[in-house]
Every structure is written in C-alpha cells, then in structure tokens.
Amino acid sequence: MPDRVAYLALDLGASSGRVLLGQWDGARFALRELHRFPNGGVRAGGRLYWDALRLWQACKDGLALYAREFAAPPASIGIDTWAVDFALLDAAGQLLGNPVHYRDERTAGMMEEVCEQVPRAEIFARTGIQFMPINTLYQLYALTRAGDPQLATAGTLLMVPDLFNYWLTGRTAAEYTNATTTQFFNATTRDWDRDLLAQLGLPAHLLPEVVQPGTVLGELLPAVAAEVGLPGGVPIIAPATHDTGSAVAAIPGLDARSAYISSGTWSLLGFEAPTPVLDERALAHNFTNEGGVAGTVRLLKNITGLWLLEECRRQWQREGRDYSWDDLLDAAERAASFRSLVDPDAADFANPPDMPAALRAYCARTGQPTPEEPAALARCCLESVALKYRVVLAALEELVGHPLETIRVVGGGSQNRLLCQLTADCCQRPVVAGPVEATALGNILLQAIATGQIRDLAAGRAAIADSVTLTRYEPHSSSACDAASARFAALLG
C-alpha cells in the first residue's frame, strides 16, 4: 500500500461548495480543502434556481487544481449535495433547464393538494418521509399540475448529485440515500413507489435505477479527464450522496444510546435505526426515515438551523455591517438570555427578504420584547434552535423507546460554541461536538470502503475518531431552560 491513498470529495452545500482532498495513511485521515466556491439561489424570470453549470465548472476547477499539484491520480472521486432538488434531461441526455431551488414558491399549496388525493397516513406508510413543502414529490406535482413543457420532452429525472455523477461518468443512476428524500421512494420495498406516483398522475418513467452507497458508477469520462488534466480510469464512487447521509456515516461513537445533530443551514436531529419506524406516532411527530449507509435508516426530523442567523448576517452585510461569526457569538454570549423566542420552522422564516425584520415582526406579534441589536437577534436565533432540539429529542426518545444519553453534533454548527452549550443545557445531555467536516469525511470514508482500504463502517468511524479533535459540553442547570421551554411550547401551539 502506498504511504497515503488520495481521495477527492466534491461537497456541495446550500451556501458553498468545496473540493477536498482526503488522504488515508492506513490509520488516520488527513483532510485538506483544495477549492471553495459560493453557492446559493439565483432568481430569474420569477423563479429561484440553482446555477448547475457554474457549480459543475467549479467542481472541474477543483479537480484541475489537484491535477496540477499531484502527479498520481486519486484513488477515486465522490460527490455529495443537498437533497430533494432535481434536474430533467431530454432523450439525448441534455439538461433541459437549471434545477429549481427548494425554496422557490412553486410548491405553495401543493402538499395540501397531494394529501387531498392520497391521505397523509398512506403516503407516510409507504415512504416514511417527513411532510415538508420542499419535498421532491410536491415539486414534481407542481410541474405536472402546471403542464410544464419540460416534462413533455424529459427522458430522465436526476437528483442534483446524480446529475453531477452523470456528467462525470455518462451513467444515469439514483443513489439510494438521496432517492429516499423524494417522498416517492418506498421505505419497505426500497425502490421507487410507482403506485404512489400513478395515483397522483406523476411520470414514473423518468426515474433511473437505484444504486447503494459505495457503488462504483464508472470511470471519469475521457473528455472530462482531459479537460481537468487527470489520467483516464479514475473511478467515480457514489458515497451517501445526500450530504447528511455522509455526515452521519462519519460520526465517531454513534451507538444505540446516542442522538446526532447534523448542524448547518438545516439541523437534522436523529437516531441511526436498523429499520424504518412507520407507525402513527412517527407520523404524528412528522419524523422522517431516510436511507442510511450499511443498511441503516436515519430516523430524524429536519429543523431549521443556522439559516436564521445566516440570513441575518447576509442582511447586515447588505446594509454595510459585516460581522464575523466570532463577533456575533461573543456579543450573543453577553446578551440577555431567553428574552425573545421564535419557532425556527415557522413559515415566516422560510425565505423572507429581510430576516431581522421577520424575526422582530414575529416577536411583536407574539407579545414578546423585540430584539433590535445583532447580539439580541443572534441570541434569539440560537436559543430558539436549541429549544426546538429539546422538543424534537423528546419525541425521538418516544419513537426509539429508550433514553438517548449523548448528543453528537457534527458539521459547521459543531464549531458554534454557544449553540453547543445551549443544546447541552436545554436538552440536559452532554454534547460531543465534531468533526466539523463530517460530510467530507463520510464521503471519503465510503470511498475508502469501496476501494478496499477500510474494512467496514465501524472501522472507519474508529479511524475518524483518531483523526479529529472532539469537544465535550456538559449541561448546566436547567432552571432557565425549563422556564423558557414552557414559553416556547406556547409558541408551538
């Protein structure tokens, strides 16, 4: 075995994308960012899109940076992205249009219309997926209902990571962990639910074959290899292409007594289960059963996470006030606690033009003090998210049937010391934070398993534990959180 085996992870998030180099020395992983680029919605013609072609070029730029620095090719390449969004290809395999952003308004009212045709209980029993207006099911229903001309000429529907894998290899396939998020994938048969699509008059013929995480999809296309300066024959491996699936794969110490939070723009609070939970309690709590790696199920709930504070920061930047994350956290730590609270998942915060104004309006409408300064707004955002974690954790423990003694936080939010401490305090559980780069590490871990460098998931998680620094937060007195929790429950109704 060479001293170090190199893997490339293309990691596309909602606000930025990266190309990362992961090196495996037989015992530990080393991770290095080669290329970072911005991402976000682009509004045009009344629609909110993702700029897929710019993202594709940025990915190729990152591959070219690797090729210029290293003579030896990587052992493989893998991509992960966000979920639910998709692209349509015509019969010749050409892109029909940019993927529409999940925050676009086209799905307004679509979830309610779908549930009038097929009861919620039936949809959940089939798919096990949380009801959210952003789901692929409602996006596809909106296209069909509007008679979108792209559907008439489409030959294939590809989720966003599957689109990039198609451009890398020429193969159309749907990776399992991302396919499950569509809400038209059957949790029991583990295949597309064509009967559900037929009931709704949706085009099932567009759906490609489903492959499991760790599948070698093919080799980098010669034309792409020549463009970026890599030799031919580099394997393209589907990790868990849903970024949360890769992040959960990389959580050290994850066991039957642990809950996890993949913390970023969204927070995904869940439990790694052996089988889906499809009963009435899971439906009532609106939990989701997404596909995991190694045959597992990610029983979790999507919670609006750092989106609130990210959008506040973006608005302040537009106003000429460019606060660093450290500045905001320092100020928030000094601000009065539990003064103003919001439901992070309220429709008010889905995509407002001015997030600070939306937060103030919510607080005023609910009879609370109005947070004016950035410190108070940041404190409001983080305390509200931590209190939502408390509510969701209680529901998760009900579904699992036993206490979850530790919360393991990964992703960008694991660096947010105030949110981690608030989580420990509000949930009265120790929080173990890290790794920050869980998604990229999980992506690379699954490539290493697929190429035979690592035995299995357990061995990979142990190696990640040896490769990163973890931070532990112990819970403080719960009295203030208990009082705030009662006020928060009233906001949730």
Image (tube, rainbow, N blue to C red):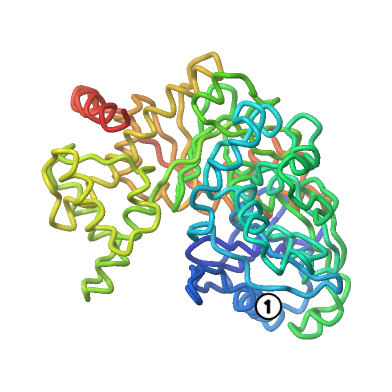
Compare residues 493 and 405 and report the one nearer the observer.
493
The residue located at (34%, 53%) in the rendering is 308
Residue 301 in the image, given as x and y percentages of width and height: 51, 35
Q: Dividing the image into 4 quarters, which one contains the N terminus? A: bottom right
Q: Is 394 placed left or right of 312 in the picture? A: right
Q: Is residue 348 above or below residue 66?
A: above
Count neighbours of disc 1 (C-alpha within 10 A) and say few if under 14, some if 14 to 19, many if 20 or more: many
Residue type marked 1: Lys
Compare residues 462 and 491 and report the one nearer the observer.
491
The residue located at (82%, 48%) in the rendering is 210
Numbered label tally = 1
Q: Dividing the image into 4 quarters, which one contains the C terminus? A: top left
The residue located at (50%, 66%) in the rendering is 16
Q: Is 54 placed left or right of 3 in the picture? A: left
Q: Is residue 263 above or below residue 102?
A: above
Name the residue tied to disc 1.
60
Residue 351 in the image, given as x and y percentages of width and height: 39, 58
Q: Secondary structure at mark 1?
A: helix
The residue located at (56%, 26%) in the rendering is 283
Residue 461 in the image, given as x and y percentages of width and height: 64, 40
Q: Is residue 374 above or below residue 469?
A: below
Residue situated furthest top in the rendering: 401
Residue 63 in the image, given as x and y percentages of width and height: 69, 76
